Image (cartoon, rainbow, N blue to C red):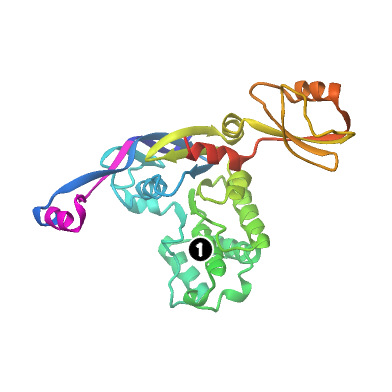
Amino acid sequence: MEQIVVEHVTKEYRIPYKAGGFAGNLRNRIAGRMTTVHAVSDLSFSIEKGEMAGYIGPNGAGKSTTIRLMCGMTAPTSGTITVNGLDPQKDRKRVVARLGVAFGQLSRLERDLKLGESFELLRRIYRVALPEYRRNLEELVERLELTGLLDIPAGLLSAGQRMRGEIAAALLHTPDILFLDEPTVGLDVDAKKAVRSLITDWNREKQITVVLTSHDLEDVSRLCRRLIVIRDGRIVRDGPREEIVKDMAPWRLLKLEVSGFDGRLRAKTAELVSWENNRLVCRFDHHKYSASEVIRELSAGLNILDLSVEEPDIEEAVERIYHL
């Protein structure tokens, strides 16, 4: 079932024309000269119910604009969007009622209210039945370690504490769709694991669709099975995470322990990356050669004692995509 459908969506902004230095800019403003900026251009994709999709790209690529469009916070210049079969602009209240949103720049917590009071306020806003609310709250407080924070005003929480509170606030009403923007920013290692585990479990158990934007590639690799990559307002890749990583990261590393290495690697299928104390790191293009082919060639000239092959890395893949 397609839960989010984006079809040929473009979002344009009109801004003052800038050119000709300070004096030129002043004349342009007085004359009312404007220019058009395309935040996103001809976007088309759909997300199925229960998917975990990473929506990634460099700063300024159009990620935040797309999320705002899907939440009904702004209208597209052209194209159509449906969320749960509804138009986010025309039926915004009904759409938003089934969304969970945790964005750093869009807080759901009232700064002057205690964290627990903000949760209770959200229960009333979303009209969550008490049994469901208490069940969700108990699990979220325990798994996100919020017990000692419920009586503290949100404005006094640290960045990491606030983010955990924002995630809890986004999930209290068991949304159909969860939009997350940098969900583990400011968190320590244990808190990051707890957040990822919670999101994974709720996605599986409650079939909550998750759309994640993040620069933390560990978030992306651990949470998302699909990547939608946007650059300059256009989608440049969309598909299974493993497929994109395999296609965009051509190098695999082969780590070897050998005896009697003289510092020269005589091979056509691989090149030497580093060498220290008879421990070698080589790399090979897995689009051209299989690991077995490389190992077979190296074995003919080296006395190999041990070896391991490292798969393509998501960081390398995303880096290459960003620099297309």
Q: Residue at x 43, y 78 (%)?
A: 112
Query: Looking at the image, which is closer to me, 305 or 104?
Result: 305
Percent of width and height locating residue 197: 65, 53
Percent of width and height locating residue 178: 49, 51
Q: Quadrant of residue 6?
A: top left
Query: Looking at the image, which is closer to me, 238 or 195?
Result: 238
Query: Looking at the image, which is closer to me, 161 or 165?
Result: 161
Q: Amino acid at mark 1?
A: Glu
Indicate yes or no whether the magenta region holds residue 16. yes
Span shown in magenta? 9-28
Residue matched to label 1 = 166
Percent of width and height locating residue 73: 33, 53
User: Is there any visible trace of residue 48 in the rendered image?
Assistant: no
Q: Quick check: 318 above or below 286?
A: below
| Pointer 1 local density, CA inside 10 Å: few below 14, some 14–19, many at least 20 | many
Left/right of residue 294 with respect to residue 58 in the rendered view: right
Left/right of residue 120 with respect to residue 186 in the rendered view: left
Q: Quick check: 291 above or below 109?
A: above
Percent of width and height locating residue 192: 63, 58
Q: Residue at x 20, y 45 (%)?
A: 35
Q: Residue at x 61, y 57 (%)?
A: 195
Left/right of residue 290 with respect to residue 227 in the rendered view: right
- Element type at mark 1: helix
Q: Residue at x 31, y 48 (%)?
A: 91
Left/right of residue 210 with respect to residue 78 in the rendered view: right
